[in-house]
Image (tube, grey):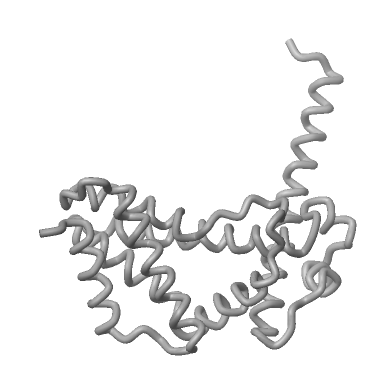
Amino acid sequence: MTDIVTRIAQRALARRGANYADEVRRLLDAALAVMRERGTGSRPRVADIVAAAGLSNDAFYRHFPSKDALVAALIEDGAERLLSYLAHQMDKEVTAQGKIRRWVEGILAQGADDTAATTRAVLWNAGTLAEDCATGFRSADVLLASLLYQPFTELGSADPEFDAALVAHAIVGKLGDYLQRRVQPAPADVQRMTLFCLRTAAPA
């Protein structure tokens, strides 16, 4: 049986862990809000982010060694949220073709309206990320490609992981073009890219 000292220490650690998770969430949400507000006009300082989060500099540096580390974490957090959204949308379809169409539509939707402005602002802030950033930055297209493995396999791809990675790189790259040019993907563009994905998954 665990002694009283260990039990008290474990409860304290659990409370501290919950508090720290809350701090990280507040910092990420505050950074996103400040970047969205400023757009591509100016990059926020750490002081701006902690003020918006209602936290201290000590709280910031407890979790992030630099602002670059926070921006990298913010991009990864956004990619994981998009991953969850796309998986939910794809689950509504019963065919591999339908799942791929939902995947393309969901990614290109990041280039529309207010979502585009937010995405553009975050990526613009990421333009100064240090190469040795301590937070593990993973390219969004690597995460998003994983959702295509199963439908690509169903459609007969000889190498689903390679083909999915190729498609994800192309579609996410095209999204970047739309964001940079500040134009929204047209329905015909979405259809064309969906057909490109399908041809890659099931070559003739």
Q: Nearer the viewer, residue 192 or 103?
A: 192
**Residue visible at 23% across and 69% down in the picture:** 196
Quarter-of-image position of residue 60? bottom right
Q: How many marks?
A: 0
Left or right: where does residue 170 sit relative to residue 17? left
Q: Nearer the viewer, residue 163 or 187?
A: 163
Work out whether 132 lies above or below 173.
Answer: above
Work out whether 62 lies above or below 171.
Answer: above
Q: Nearer the viewer, residue 2 or 201?
A: 201
Where does residue 99 sit, x and y in percent of width and height?
Answer: 26, 60
Of the 4 image quadrants, the one containing the C terminus is bottom left
Quarter-of-image position of residue 171? bottom left
Work out whether 17 lies above or below 27.
Answer: above
Q: Is residue 26 visible?
A: no
Where does residue 115 sit, x and y in percent of width and height?
Answer: 51, 78
**Residue visible at 55% across and 63% down in the picture:** 78
**Residue visible at 77% across and 48% down in the picture:** 19
Residue farthest along the top direction in this orientation: 1
Left or right: where does residue 191 sit relative to residue 39? left
Residue farthest along the front direction in this orientation: 131
Where does residue 159 sit, x and y in percent of width and height?
Answer: 26, 46
Of the 4 image quadrants, the one containing the N terminus is top right
**Residue visible at 50% across and 81% down in the picture:** 116
Left or right: where does residue 104 sit relative to residue 30? left
Q: Is residue 118 visible?
A: yes
